[in-house]
Image (tube, rainbow, N blue to C red):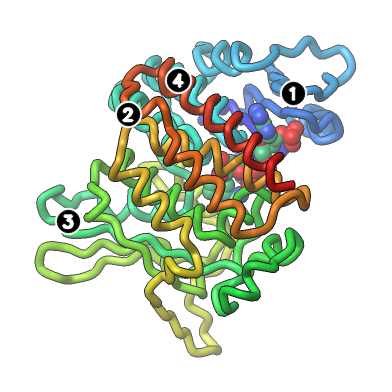
Amino acid sequence: MRRIALFGASGSIGRQTLDVVRRLKYDLVAVSVHNNTEALASIYAEFRPKYVVITGNAAPPAGVKPLYGREGLVEVAESEDVDTVVVATNGIIGVFPTLAALKRGKRVALANKETLVAFGPFVREVADLGELVPIDSEHSSAFQLLNGVKREEVKKLILTASGGPFRTWPKERIAKARPEDALRHPTWRMGAKITVDSATLMNKGLEVIEAHFLFDLSADEIDVRIHPQSAIHAILLLKDNSLKMHVSRPDMRIPIQYALTYPGREEIPIPPYLPPDEEVVLTLEMPDTERFPALALAYRALRLGGTYPAVLNAANEVAVFAFLEGRIGFYDITAIVERVMEENPFAHERTFEGFLKAHEWAARRAKELVSSKS
Ligand SMILES: NC(=O)c1ccc[n+]([C@@H]2O[C@H](COP(=O)([O-])OP(=O)(O)OC[C@H]3O[C@@H](n4cnc5c(N)ncnc54)[C@H](OP(=O)(O)O)[C@@H]3O)[C@@H](O)[C@H]2O)c1
């Protein structure tokens, strides 16, 4: 019986985690939401969690005394009442409960990308004190593929990307893409920010950086292939040139459930990617960094190291929300990220506080660049 704290309970990953928790009858001890009062009220009415954390402006359910903000998340992550912390918030706030829970020897089921991308070295430092199990589908697959494989037997990890809604669009058409075009993801249903990241391929770039920190692989050891069917989530190229793949339906409840049941498995009401009555065609294409420059930018940030991934992530976040608000164009997102990376004044910072400062600076600088364009 797992005693679970679910941060970001009202989001896309959060709601799917609630589905798994409900089915497996796990104990939901704590939840957090940011602004969504209605979702909090209905989650509270159903699960009656002992702790409610509010990180934004949501109103607490009647009679509930909530905890607030980053401190509230950390207090819950450290609580004796909790053994598993699901971090499914947006933004870098996820790093605080992640570090706190790992230091206390707990399991962190991590969906939040920003935590590893921006603060990878600090998460790695404490990862072995607890159990860090990824939720992101590609990393969950890689985690399972690497199980029982010796490090020296791995030549490459290949992450797959659906290619997003603009996979077949020419550059001139992509340049004019509107938010509603970018939000039309062909295979996955996700929150708005990550859906735009999938359209630019920045999502895959962030995942390459995450994979580096999770599995101790260099940029040269991580490749990307476009796989429009979203059935293969990760591939290992082994020493003997054989390939090991992990295949499932594109449904986040599968990796979410695995992060909670690991090392065991439970039944799930999702069919295998093996329809009995139709041909299965799985294709792999090379990514086009000319039409999708974000992927190359993420590799550059990973190779530069230090605060560059944090700067890339912060600038991208600001630019994506500006695009969603119709303030900038699609290719302005990567133009802003590139410019902010080039100006990074925190290249030599090595402390956690230094990384935080770099994040805050990059977000501010990206906002200035958005204002100058809009
Ligand atoms: N969706 C996916 O399939 C998927 C897959 C892999 C990884 N991820 C990662 O998982 C995380 C969540 O993604 P999502 O798609 O579930 O996002 P989402 O649908 O936008 O939900 C985000 C959740 O975080 C809360 N939140 C928003 N801003 C916050 C802030 N500044 N501080 C604390 N909490 C905040 C939201 O609360 P309110 O609803 O109250 O605003 C909501 O509960 C992201 O890091 C994403 O990259 C998602």
According to the picture, the residue beneath numbered tag 1 turns out to be: 56
Q: Of the residues shown, which amino acid type is indicated by label 2?
A: Pro
Mark 2 vs mark 3: give the one in front: 2
Asked which secondary structure carries label 2, the reply is helix
Name the residue located 46 percent from the left edge and 60 percent from the top edge. 293
Chain-order first, disc 2 or disc 3: 2
In this view, 274 is above or below 176:
below
Can you give x and y, in whole percent of width and height, for residue 304 in the image?
A: 30, 40
**Mark 1 within 8 Å of ligand 1, using the beta carbon:** yes
Q: Of the residues shown, which amino acid type is indicated by label 4?
A: Ala
**Mark 3 within 8 Å of ligand 1, using the beta carbon:** no
Picture quadrant of residue 236: bottom left
In this view, 95 is above or below 335:
above
Is 42 situated left or right of 77 in this image?
A: right
Is 185 situated left or right of 295 in this image?
A: right
Mark 4 vs mark 3: give the one in front: 3
Chain-order first, disc 1 or disc 2: 1
Chain-order first, disc 1 or disc 3: 1
Q: Of the residues shown, which amino acid type is indicated by label 1?
A: Gly
